[in-house]
Amino acid sequence: MKRARVLQVVSGISVEGPLGGSGRFVIELARALDRAEIAPMVAAIWDYHTGFEQKWSNYLTEAGVPNIIAVGWDAAAPYRSCVRSLQALQVRSDFAADILHSHGEFTDLAAIYLRRPLRAKRIVRTVHSTFEWSKRRHYGRFFSNTLYPLAFDQEVAVSQRATCNLNERLVARLGRRQARCIPNAINFQRFEKRHVDRVQKRLELGVSADALMIGTVGRLVAVKGFRYLISAVPAVLAEHPDAHFLIVGEGVEGDQLRAQAHAEGVAENVHFTGSRGDVEEILLSMDLFVSSSLIEGLPTVILEAMAARVPVVASRIPGNVELVIDGETGLLVPASAPAELASVINTALANPESMRQMAIAAQRMVQERFSIEAVADQYATLYLGLLERDR
């Protein structure tokens, strides 16, 4: 039986760059798909020049997954970068596929455009957030609400709330187009087979061995809510003066957040690491993980923290609440509320045994429900079911 050729289309493959957790998910999904039935490939629209692209390309190649990066991203000419990427991909007959599967705002448009030149029989998109086109809302009103329900053979969302959002669109209801919920997932081997010298890792990061290390990971952009976390730091230090906060990632708000830490008088206790290739080791060295996000789909980074058995404090927003059951698998706090965030962090730090039990329960939960192998099986069933319609 001929294997189904499935091309994952993603904006970039630098996990440390703009795509973050969803990028890692796409890479791991391609590697985990059953090769007896699926021939996976990955096409990245842009090279973001982070220096990590080659590492992830090699990671895919070593697993036998063909991959390509179309063109370099030019921040000074974004629309030209879009056009050039489509021109580069449309002539790559070696990446022709039965199914194109897109993961992101521009990549969804790219999948529609590339369907004919790459001879795809079906196109699928996965929505990784509860709010699409946040920077260009008029695009969202047309593309997400009107075009996509008609153009895509199947839409998928990573959380129940995001799935409901898709199914509530007028065009989707009129056309009886139902989105499916398939969650994000992670490769647990990244944590199970890794030994970390916590003392050495902390010293490497500028944190003393006996300090409390509270960490977070993500792009330094407004929707991640890092400004509220930094605003919470003084109240935490008032009760736990040995606490240090680690912010892992890069983004457009980096300088602004560093300036805020200085203005709050907490710069010595807030460490900005930039992009890192050792996130697993950093997570395993933390005492507490904090997510202060304002918008999420199903946050991969919380799955990773739970897999590393790190206690979690997270904002009470759609996506987060599907992972963090307050008082059972972590603690929830209202979003955009630094005083409440500080109070919950202090509560977590003051009750390490209770948080440890929550972390154990959280690790068990994500292992049972969010393994990349189980989710890859769900996608394989989806792909093959779509192609069955053509037989």
Image (cartoon, rainbow, N blue to C red):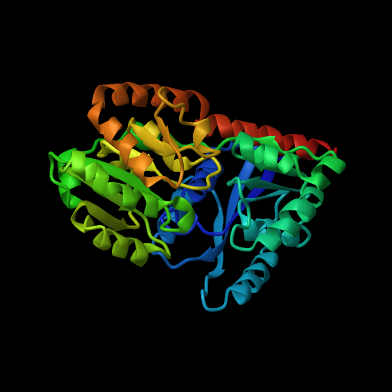
Q: Nearer the viewer, residue 344 or 95?
A: 344
Q: Residue furthest front?
A: 339
Residue at the location (58% across, 47% down)?
A: 129
Q: Position of residue 385 (x, y in %)?
A: 75, 34
Say above or below: 198 vs 133.
above
Specify the quadrant that holds the C terminus: top right
Quick check: 363 left or right of 39? Answer: left
Specify the quadrant that holds the N terminus: top right
Q: Position of residue 133 (x, y in %)?
A: 63, 57
Q: Position of residue 90 (x, y in %)?
A: 70, 66
Work out whether residue 14 can be spotted.
yes
Quick check: 254 left or right of 324? Answer: left
Q: Nearer the viewer, residue 246 or 368?
A: 246
Quick check: 175 left or right of 282? Answer: right
Quadrant assignment, res 169: top right
Residue at the location (61% across, 51% down)?
A: 103
Quadrant assignment, res 190: top left
Quadrant assignment, res 306: top left
Q: Position of residue 215 (x, y in %)?
A: 30, 44
Work out whether residue 390 can be spotted.
no
Count the numbered circles shown. Answer: 0
Say above or below: 289 vs 273.
above
Say above or below: 22 vs 110.
above
Q: Nearer the viewer, residue 55 or 162?
A: 162
Residue at the location (37% across, 46% down)?
A: 338
Q: Nearer the viewer, residue 185 or 38?
A: 185
